[in-house]
Image (cartoon, coloured by chain):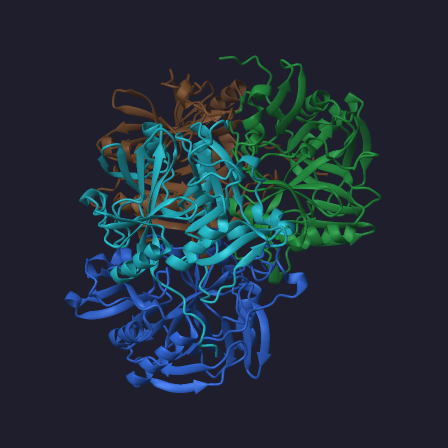
Chain colours: A brown, B green, C cyan, D blue
Amino acid sequence: MDSSAKEPMFEVAQLAHVELLTPKPDQTLRFFTDLLGLQETEREGQSVYLRAYEDFYHHTLKVTEAPKPGLGHVAWRTTSPQALERRVRAIESSGLGLGWSEGDRGHGPAYRFTTPAGHPMELLWEVAYYQAPVEQQSPLLNRPQKRPLRGVPVRRLDHLNLLAADVTPTREFMQEQLGFRLREHILFEGGSVEVGAWLSVSALQHEIALIRDQSGARGRLHHICYWYGIPQHVSDAAEIMRESGITIEAGPGKHGIAQALFLYVLEPGGNRVELFGDSGYLIFDPAWKPVTWREENMEQGIVFYGGGLPAEFFTYGTPLLEGSV
Amino acid sequence: MDSSAKEPMFEVAQLAHVELLTPKPDQTLRFFTDLLGLQETEREGQSVYLRAYEDFYHHTLKVTEAPKPGLGHVAWRTTSPQALERRVRAIESSGLGLGWSEGDRGHGPAYRFTTPAGHPMELLWEVAYYQAPVEQQSPLLNRPQKRPLRGVPVRRLDHLNLLAADVTPTREFMQEQLGFRLREHILFEGGSVEVGAWLSVSALQHEIALIRDQSGARGRLHHICYWYGIPQHVSDAAEIMRESGITIEAGPGKHGIAQALFLYVLEPGGNRVELFGDSGYLIFDPAWKPVTWREENMEQGIVFYGGGLPAEFFTYGTPLLEGSV
Amino acid sequence: MDSSAKEPMFEVAQLAHVELLTPKPDQTLRFFTDLLGLQETEREGQSVYLRAYEDFYHHTLKVTEAPKPGLGHVAWRTTSPQALERRVRAIESSGLGLGWSEGDRGHGPAYRFTTPAGHPMELLWEVAYYQAPVEQQSPLLNRPQKRPLRGVPVRRLDHLNLLAADVTPTREFMQEQLGFRLREHILFEGGSVEVGAWLSVSALQHEIALIRDQSGARGRLHHICYWYGIPQHVSDAAEIMRESGITIEAGPGKHGIAQALFLYVLEPGGNRVELFGDSGYLIFDPAWKPVTWREENMEQGIVFYGGGLPAEFFTYGTPLLEGSV
Amino acid sequence: MDSSAKEPMFEVAQLAHVELLTPKPDQTLRFFTDLLGLQETEREGQSVYLRAYEDFYHHTLKVTEAPKPGLGHVAWRTTSPQALERRVRAIESSGLGLGWSEGDRGHGPAYRFTTPAGHPMELLWEVAYYQAPVEQQSPLLNRPQKRPLRGVPVRRLDHLNLLAADVTPTREFMQEQLGFRLREHILFEGGSVEVGAWLSVSALQHEIALIRDQSGARGRLHHICYWYGIPQHVSDAAEIMRESGITIEAGPGKHGIAQALFLYVLEPGGNRVELFGDSGYLIFDPAWKPVTWREENMEQGIVFYGGGLPAEFFTYGTPLLEGSV
């Protein structure tokens, strides 16, 4: 029995929330509330705080008005206050730490940092739980509120996908400083170029994915993803997106990578949003060996069934690059 | 920030396998292979080793011929070899340890113990991975074999549910010695009697549930559960169970507790088997406060929708009690 | 080749609309619009006209305030104006005709009559088609409007089920005067008592069902049914019914008879409403032999899977009987 | 009331069966039985007779070995023996009649003819019903046999789609000689060129579709279609097709035309087979006005959601043309 190996780290618990920037805040808001059934929790300044009906905290999405679409920041919750302190020290020693913020609506102090690829992130422990008003309380004691009667309501925030000029350093940062496990990745050119990586801290196949940004830009967002968990709902969502004039970029279809039943749409502000239609496969193996996809099996990796992905899927991100269409 | 609290324990990773006893091994085997699409990996003595098509290890079910139906044993995999050693010491100090076995087909040394309620269990680290023959390899590199073309194939082992004369001591044992987190429980009589508890070590709502055995017997099984994750499949399963003459005890329906889309059937040997139809809700909150169900909200707790549960659901377990029908 | 047999009659095309009486019109209306996504077309007097998003005509439901719940009337559309004239003559000769009405919002002249069991019905040819306002027009040219963003929207009116003190005369009237075909029926006591019958004029298994009214009352309604056609939606509907405090009488489950995936709820006015979750089986055989269910196979006839039906299912109808609870 | 208009004709009841030619009979047979769960009823000469588990007759598919893939013939059942005689006279007067055959396994005398576009068809009345052996009888008295435990079993034959050098004459022939109703069609170039037409004799949106054969060839098949009626099953089918090495041409996706949830695959003999995943929309309106799709709304007509159709979809048919790849 090999007991000399390094033990796995269990210090980050989950994706807590994402801040999304949008130049069209009213339309972005209507997209998330009328079509996807998100609930507004609070407003302050140029920001609106939203959550899905199975999200337990104050918010999982902060929509902030800005000149361009893109990622505001990403917040991760640790598994304990002690874990937060240890991770802060690790990030500080990596040189990517930015220092503490006092917190925001819905959570306490947060330690800010950037990934090697330039994405603003924060780590936090203290969160405020959502408390539904009486008329919104579900007879399900384990559900934070009733299922909304608007649109095709998503259930919870699932993951996000970031563009990185160089995937490997950010992937390693997430593993080494934060304890993410590598679940799957794409290696091209005989394994020498990592063009995508999927990592998680839980049984989910990924809470974060990284895709190579061929433009070399820093800090861009590929997409955020909310979860249905029920395949039919992603078809229902496709129907209402089509009838509401929302651009469907791809799907419904099933990726081979992550076995994800996907639908990709562009919200009116320009950010790509994925809707995840089933539960994918879950990973419980503590010694999981990362799955490697190479050029020769990318066809089924990209799409196992359900139509292809357009070329833009691999280049479009927010903010858009100067001069791009 | 409260950093003096005890940190959570991450030492058990998953339910590795279950051994089921059956007086009708041929029929039990046909049930699992022809109807649920399990694959036979190996046979030895009176036992057959089986796995579902998304189970990564050698087996998740060991079916063993015995005079009566019931639970053979339950195996948990730790998160590391070091965690195994630490948990063995903890169990030893609890006085419930039984010592090491040399292992079995498909796994290495295992430390044997019993729960306070008398269920045989073991902890292990070393496992053998299933390697599909070429014609059974899926183009999905993250799937251990092709989806079977038999029956309505289940995807993976999900959880088990044990009967305990006294729920609380076994629930506390699972929490304190093994690091399980209490997700939901049922408290009757002003909170003084715990009649059910659901615990997990992962994002799953439970890998183990405990229900009070009103007979006072030791070591009985309520059910094991395999997972579809896709709601339609549990309806498909109900169709083939009905047409194959398999007794459906309850469902398809949805529990309030665990929000589980359930179908309960009795395999020919007499053991109750649950088929889990969706992904339920997943728990990522590291400070999860257990949900408490009481007499006044048991109606929706037991069944949120889909018909009720028969009285036998709360008393039937394997082995059957002497003199029971 | 037997060419001397009587040819089948193709004179009634479809169930056009149903009028429902309710003592709680506001709540009944909110049930149909907020939870089931029906659209209000028009109001007049004590009536509101509604339709589902795949209903092509002006309305399929007329909700009328009345002291008691129950059936206002049922309207059938013929296959041609000539067929209307022929059917009127046939009904007149049966002695059950009541004469012409000038029509109503949404349709032209209608010939009124009652069934032998006392249900008000009418036959009509001229109908007004729904024309969606521009912002409600779907890019699907074959869909009369966009899918609503409210509740879990039903797609179209499917069928109705009437209580009859004596099933057989009304069943024969529907066959002989109107050309309905008997699809399935229940015969008890050696075939001497017909306790249920399912009839249709199209590929649907039934547009009308008749169940014996053990109370001997006349003209009562068992239920009306709207159709989803997608199994998941009936589960979604069950969720929102539960959370909205609507009584679920039974389901989701699957009847053996008609192979219908059912959910039965009581709308706030007291009328039973069925939501039909899949497409059932369709009948194209022009020489269909009615399926006969008897005492010995009623268990699977009533419920193939999904929990049983309560005793009230077989006695509750609207209006309620004096003295019943 | 306009009672001078011509009354609709109700003389053809349904698509009875299709004969498919294949140069690889063993592989074609395994495709239909192992993957789609069809049952073999009988063999004779170079032909095998098959049916789906909800098909009531002796067969709905006759697979016949031949040098090239393609359509053997199509059989329609009339609504009565008298209707058969009338339709035969009408076809005879059109000059496209070929005379009576004595029948085949599973049906009686059939009148043979060709469409203007050269497709062999026949009309018949007498059919043999499938009688399941005892162990295959379902507790559902309205289901001709148990649901198979092989593959992802289809439920019944739904429709077929034929290529026609000139769509209009064949479309008119089906309407005028056989009583089909035009449900939807595609008109290009200001309405002067009909490139597709969908017709039915029942509530189904179509039992036959016609698409323009740009090659000008006669008698080619675009596809036959079996029906699931349950959306999840078409995704399940896509999974097993991918893992079995069967070419998926397109889907799962949803056409705007017919609102059909489609999956198109090529069976090993080369014929295109569609699997229909939901119930589409049904047409009960006896005065249905055909829906017309034009160049400007073809995008949503072709695919409402779910990825596009490859260019070959519009040109590939069987038999293949000399010189084509």
Front residue (pair D174, A137): D174
Front residue (pair B197, D39): D39
Give x and y (percent) for residue B82: 69, 31
Front residue (pair D216, C109): C109
Quadrant location of residue C133?
top left
Q: Quadrant of the C terminus of chain B?
A: top right
Is B197 situated left or right of B119 in this image?
left
Query: Could one spot residue B32 in this view of the protein?
Result: yes
Quadrant location of residue A222?
top left
The total of numbered circles placed on residues is 0
Give x and y (percent) for residue A302: 43, 53
- Above or below, A62 against C132 in this view is above
Q: Residue at the spot x=21%, y=66% of the render?
A: D5
Quadrant location of residue D284?
bottom left
Give x and y (percent) for residue C119: 39, 44
Is B114 situated left or right of C233 in this image?
right
Query: Could one spot residue D231 in this view of the protein?
Result: no
- Above or below, B114 against B240 in this view is above
Is C299 situated left or right of C67 in this image?
right
Q: Residue at the spot x=54%, y=58% of the render?
A: C291
Is C110 situated left or right of B100 in this image?
left
Give x and y (percent) for residue A214: 33, 47
